[in-house]
């Protein structure tokens, strides 16, 4: 998981996130995460500011090192990857409605908000400055909640004590200067950045260490505020004067103050949360201003960076000319962006529907096929919710036929019921038309080549008879080799014809009920006569009946056996097995050969794709065998896949539905 750049770094929590198998959580595997979640996670891990993400309907949690102390000694590490409802069960009645509101687009934020948390084995009052913000995609669809938070428990306690001390001081100011010293000591030890500006010139009368840290090495004490910090002249100073002149407290949140850290240093855009509070003399007049401040620059910059990444994402989609869709299964609604509407030839801006706009917009020859694909997508056990299909649309208004490739993901609730389906569509009309022209050419050439090959085969047979009659052993041997080459050529031409037929949707299946075990056994026995270079073992379990095209399934098995022989050294063991697995009949072919690199596994069934290695270069082929196998299995409503590791062999699998006879048994 460390290969994902957005998951790099992040300290201890970064390591914890990378160690979790997210496919076992409602969020799903990392490679299926939506872009907005990846961006938010990357930003969260890159900042020391306390942040966490509550994703999806279940509010599954991810958090960084800065947030980890907030969980105390009892909530971490189990909080990572589980629901916020579970981690903060004791306050869910408080925050649950806030989270639900954010998922509807209503961000919230509070300062010094009290939560009764049980995080160290007992319930304690904890205070926080926090904001709950929606994490949304480029269309404003909200997938989760971004929480930025500063624990202010100590600050609030300190402020409460400070207020009490302040009142006590004002009451006793006339009696003793000792209490002034006590208050000063308290200010110096307070967990908040505090200063006192005295008189109408706002002279820095007191500065505690945390306030001085805002301006290292700058001399503040004893100077009027505009002399010590001339940069604040303008709105900030006007606010300060207003507090003094009008005897009114002012509270600011995320206020931008361009200010230097050092004398003569460069101005920096810094953000602060602060309170300006009037200080009163014994007679009740304002004689100064108390300042309580917190710098929140990192939090604000993190929020800005997130917005910037969202803008980049929107630009990338626009540049790629992608259309996007979002289907809410619970509400029964669909949302299409402008590009998606264009690709379906829809000009109206009304709400689109699955039946009226999507299905009716499909080409008649593709409607049934695409509907079946979507049915499988919505069945989690068959597809894991992944959606990848090519189809044609017929524009409602312009009647233009367009080829599209659609990719998407369905999301499921705890009962594996789909509740959301999102994805994108890309126009591939030019590419598909080129492929169709190429297929037409291949089909034409293949048909033209078959005629001379048929004649050549006939001449070879006549010559073989003549050579045998004349007892010409040399000619007989040469003709056998020539005949083998003609058969290879015929096989390749038939392969190209099959590809062309599949691409044009003209391939037909002659289905019947038969015992799969018998087909596999006969195929293995016949193959052994052709190739005796490897040890082939057939492992049979219970009888398995299927309803399929006998010859086509035999073609698939022969291709897999042939590949196992070609790509493994002589004398190696090949095992073919039939079994019943997850409601389907399953066939596997295992070899001890060269294996397949992980980068090639996902492409191995693509048309004309060949693994590039020194070993494969010496093996003839055009990369259509496995493609044909995949298409034949697809036409049978089955699935084909491979498990392999480079240098350790491969196991190819395919499964098929059981026959009606088997289901009734």
Image (cartoon, rainbow, N blue to C red):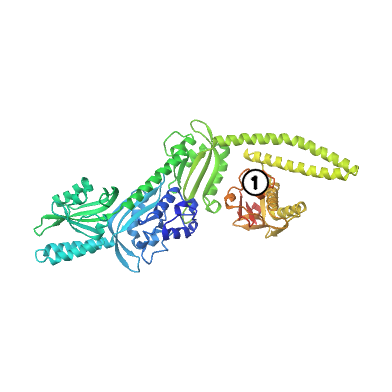
Where 400 sits versus 484, above or below?
above
| Front-most of residues 213 and 499 | 213
Where 606 sits versus 71, above or below?
above
Q: Which residue is drawn at 78% across and 44% down?
A: 484
Q: Residue at x 17, y 66 (%)?
A: 182
Q: In this view, does 288 lie to the left or right of 8?
A: left
| Residue furthest to the bottom | 121
| Residue furthest to the top | 398
Is residue 8 in view from this perspective? yes
Q: How many labels does the image show?
A: 1
| Front-most of residues 636 and 443 | 443
- On the image, the x and y values in percent for residue 424 come to 48, 43
- On the image, the x and y values in percent for residue 305 come to 37, 48
- On the image, the x and y values in percent for residue 571 come to 73, 58
| Residue furthest to the front | 264
Tell me where residue 65 sits by quadrant.
Answer: bottom left
Q: Residues within 10 Å of mark 1 (few under 14, many from 20)?
A: many
Q: Quadrant of the C terminus?
A: bottom right
Q: Is residue 547 left or right of residue 526?
A: left
Q: Residue at x 33, y 64 (%)?
A: 117
| Residue furthest to the right | 470
- The residue that mark 1 highlights is 632
| Front-most of residues 337 and 414 | 337
Where 505 sits versus 228, above or below?
above
- On the image, the x and y values in percent for residue 464 come to 85, 42
Where 77 sits versus 585, above or below?
below
Q: In this view, does 523 lie to the left or right of 342?
A: right
Is residue 374 in view from this perspective? no
- Of helix, strand and loop, which one carries label 1? helix
């Amino acid at each position: 998981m460390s290969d994902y750049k957005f998951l790099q770094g992040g300290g201890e929590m970064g390591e914890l996130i990378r160690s979790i198998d997210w496919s076992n959580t409602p969020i799903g595997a990392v490679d299926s995460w939506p872009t907005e979640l990846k961006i938010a996670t990357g930003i969260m891990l890159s900042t020391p500011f306390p942040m966490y993400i509550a994703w999806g309907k279940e509010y599954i949690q991810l958090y960084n090192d800065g947030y980890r102390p907030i969980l105390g000694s009892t909530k971490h590490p189990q909080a990572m990857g589980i629901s916020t409802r579970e981690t903060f069960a004791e306050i869910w009645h408080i925050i649950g409605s806030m989270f639900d509101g954010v998922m509807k687009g209503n961000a919230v934020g509070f300062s010094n908000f009290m939560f009764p948390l049980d995080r160290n084995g007992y319930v304690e009052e904890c205070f926080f400055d926090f904001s709950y913000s929606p994490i949304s995609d480029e269309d404003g669809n909200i997938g989760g909640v971004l929480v930025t938070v500063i624990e202010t428990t100590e600050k609030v306690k300190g402020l409460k004590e400070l207020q009490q001390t302040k009142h006590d001081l004002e009451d006793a100011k006339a009696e003793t200067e000792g209490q002034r010293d006590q208050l000063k000591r308290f200010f110096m030890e307070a967990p908040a950045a505090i200063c006192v500006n005295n008189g109408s010139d706002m002279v820095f009368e007191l500065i505690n260490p945390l306030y001085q840290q805002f301006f290292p090495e700058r001399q503040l004490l004893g100077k009027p505020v505009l002399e010590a910090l001339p940069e604040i002249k303008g709105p900030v100073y006007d606010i300060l004067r207003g507090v003094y002149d009008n005897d009114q407290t002012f509270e600011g949140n995320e206020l931008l103050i361009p200010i230097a850290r050092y004398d003569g240093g460069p101005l920096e855009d810094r953000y602060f949360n602060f309170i300006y509070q009037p200080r009163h003399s014994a007679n009740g007049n304002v004689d100064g201003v108390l300042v309580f401040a917190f710098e929140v620059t990192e939090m604000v910059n993190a929020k800005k960076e997130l917005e910037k990444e969202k803008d980049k994402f929107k630009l990338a989609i626009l540049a790629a000319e992608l259309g996007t869709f979002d289907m809410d299964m619970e509400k029964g609604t669909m949302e299409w962006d402008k590009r998606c509407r264009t690709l379906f030839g829809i000009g109206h801006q009304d709400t689109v529907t699955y039946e009226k706009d999507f299905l009716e917009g499909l080409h008649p020859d593709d409607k049934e096929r695409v509907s079946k694909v979507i049915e499988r997508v919505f069945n989690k056990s068959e597809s894991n919710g992944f959606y990848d299909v090519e189809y044609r649309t017929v524009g409602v208004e312009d009647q233009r036929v367009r080829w599209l490739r659609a990719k998407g993901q369905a999301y499921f609730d705890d009962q594996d019921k789909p509740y959301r389906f999102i994805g994108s569509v890309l126009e591939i009309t030019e590419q598909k038309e080129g492929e169709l022209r190429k297929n037409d050419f291949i089909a034409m050439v293949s048909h033209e080549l078959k005629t001379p090959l048929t004649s050549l085969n006939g001449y070879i047979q006549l010559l073989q008879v003549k050579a045998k009659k004349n007892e010409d052993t040399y000619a007989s041997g040469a003709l056998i080799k020539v005949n083998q080459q003609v058969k290879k050529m015929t096989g390749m031409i038939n392969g190209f014809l099959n590809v062309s037929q599949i691409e044009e949707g003209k391939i037909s299946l002659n289905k019947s009920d038969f015992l799969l075990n018998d087909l596999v056994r006969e195929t293995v026995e016949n193959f052994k006569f052709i190739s005796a270079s490897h040890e082939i073992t057939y492992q049979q379990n219970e009888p398995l009946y299927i309803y399929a095209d006998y010859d086509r399934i035999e073609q698939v098995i022969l291709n897999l056996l042939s590949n196992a022989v070609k790509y493994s050294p002589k004398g190696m063991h090949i095992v073919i097995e039939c079994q019943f697995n997850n409601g389907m009949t399953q066939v596997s072919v295992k070899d001890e050969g060269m294996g397949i690199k992980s980068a090639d596994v996902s492409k191995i069934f693509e048309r004309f794709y060949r693994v590039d290695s020194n070993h494969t270069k010496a093996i003839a082929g055009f990369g259509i065998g496995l493609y044909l196998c995949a298409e034949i299995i697809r036409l049978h409503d089955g699935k084909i896949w491979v498990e392999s590791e480079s240098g350790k062999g491969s196991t190819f699998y395919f499964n098929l539905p059981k026959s009606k006879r088997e289901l009734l048994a």
